[in-house]
Image (spheres, rainbow, N blue to C red):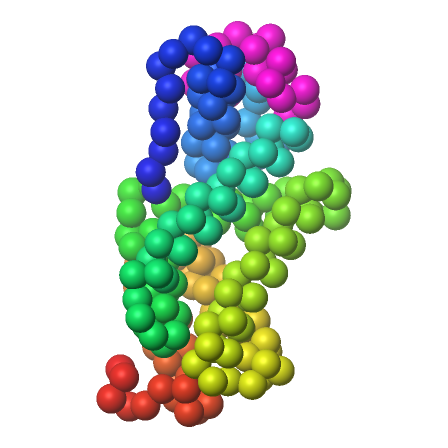
């Protein structure tokens, strides 16, 4: 995924460098095992600078997750908006994940990792993770409704599509299955076909 680097010495620049370094390490190593010292070394700043912008490590974790959520939502919105029909927009989500799973920057799901390490132990982080999941389920539901599906069915099926993506994420990380998103899309297409949301000619 694209990242932004700052080389200036401004407060904004240093704060962004710390956040970028933290996200890079959290994505590859995990959250609790990454020390503030490791973050400040990668960011090229002092430990005092880290704590000036992020009073606690948990604050930094929360903001790193929030920033990651916004980035994914922005990229998915761009991919979706390039398509014309609800069906094509849904397919675009799976295609985006397919590209992610095949990229060198894929090291598993930061949200799943955070849930494993923090869920029910840190309210703010738990709320962020739940909000991200709710947002994805809602996005699927709205696209299904835009295609004519009734709201109750769309809500239930939207959650199902989220579960398929979650399963694909696990397959991609744990089993090194680069085709996981495509396989999840195939299962999705079968469900959409069963609900008369698409026809055989749409495959």
Q: Where 202 falls versus 164 (above or below)?
A: below
The quarter of the picture where the N terminus appears is top left
Q: Which residues are magenta?
A: 39-57
Between 176 and 155, which is closer to the camera in this rendering?
A: 155
Q: Where 101 falls versus 15 (above or below)?
A: below
Q: Quadrant of residue 171?
A: bottom left
Between 111 and 10, which is closer to the camera in this rendering?
A: 10
Q: How many marks?
A: 0
| Residue ID at (38%, 12%) | 8
Please check the rendered image and state whether residue 46 is part of the magenta-colored stretch, yes or no.
yes
The quarter of the picture where the C terminus appears is bottom left
| Residue ID at (56%, 66%) | 138
Using residue 78 as the reference point, say whether residue 141 is left or right of it. Answer: right
Using residue 76 as the reference point, say whether residue 154 is left or right of it. Answer: right
Please check the rendered image and state whether residue 95 is part of the magenta-colored stretch, yes or no.
no
Give the overall secondary structure of the magenta segment: helix
**Residue 26 visible at all:** yes
Between 102 and 6, which is closer to the camera in this rendering?
A: 6
Q: Percent from the top left, x then y, of residue 7?
A: 35, 14
Q: Where 113 falls versus 93 (above or below)?
A: above
Q: Percent from the top left, x then y, of residue 63?
A: 58, 34
| Residue ID at (46%, 72%) | 143
**Residue 182 visible at all:** no
Q: Percent from the top left, x then y, of residue 140?
A: 49, 69
Q: Percent from the top left, x then y, of residue 173?
A: 42, 53
Q: Quadrant of residue 65?
A: top right
Q: Where 90 falls versus 103 (above or below)?
A: below
Using residue 35 as the reference point, say whether residue 203 is left or right of it. Answer: left
| Residue ID at (37%, 19%) | 6
């Amino acid at each position: 995924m694209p990242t932004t680097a700052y080389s200036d010495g401004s407060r904004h620049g240093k704060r962004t460098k710390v956040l970028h370094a933290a996200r890079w390490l959290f994505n590859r190593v995990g959250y609790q095992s990454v020390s503030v010292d490791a973050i400040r070394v990668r960011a090229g700043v002092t430990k005092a600078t880290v704590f000036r912008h992020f009073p606690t490590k948990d604050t930094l974790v929360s903001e790193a997750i929030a920033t990651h959520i916004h980035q994914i939502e922005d990229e998915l919105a761009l991919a979706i908006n390039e398509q014309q029909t609800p069906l094509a927009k849904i397919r675009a989500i799976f295609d985006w994940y397919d590209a992610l799973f095949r990229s060198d920057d894929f090291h598993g799901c930061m949200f799943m990792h955070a849930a494993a390490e923090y869920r029910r132990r840190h309210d703010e982080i738990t709320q962020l993770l739940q909000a991200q999941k709710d947002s994805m389920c809602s996005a699927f539901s709205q696209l299904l409704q835009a295609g004519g599906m009734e709201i109750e069915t769309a809500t239930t099926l939207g959650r199902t599509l989220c579960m398929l993506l979650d399963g694909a994420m696990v397959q991609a990380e744990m089993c090194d299955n680069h085709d996981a998103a495509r396989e999840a899309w195939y299962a999705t297409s079968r469900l959409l076909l069963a609900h008369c949301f698409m026809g055989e000619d749409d495959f």
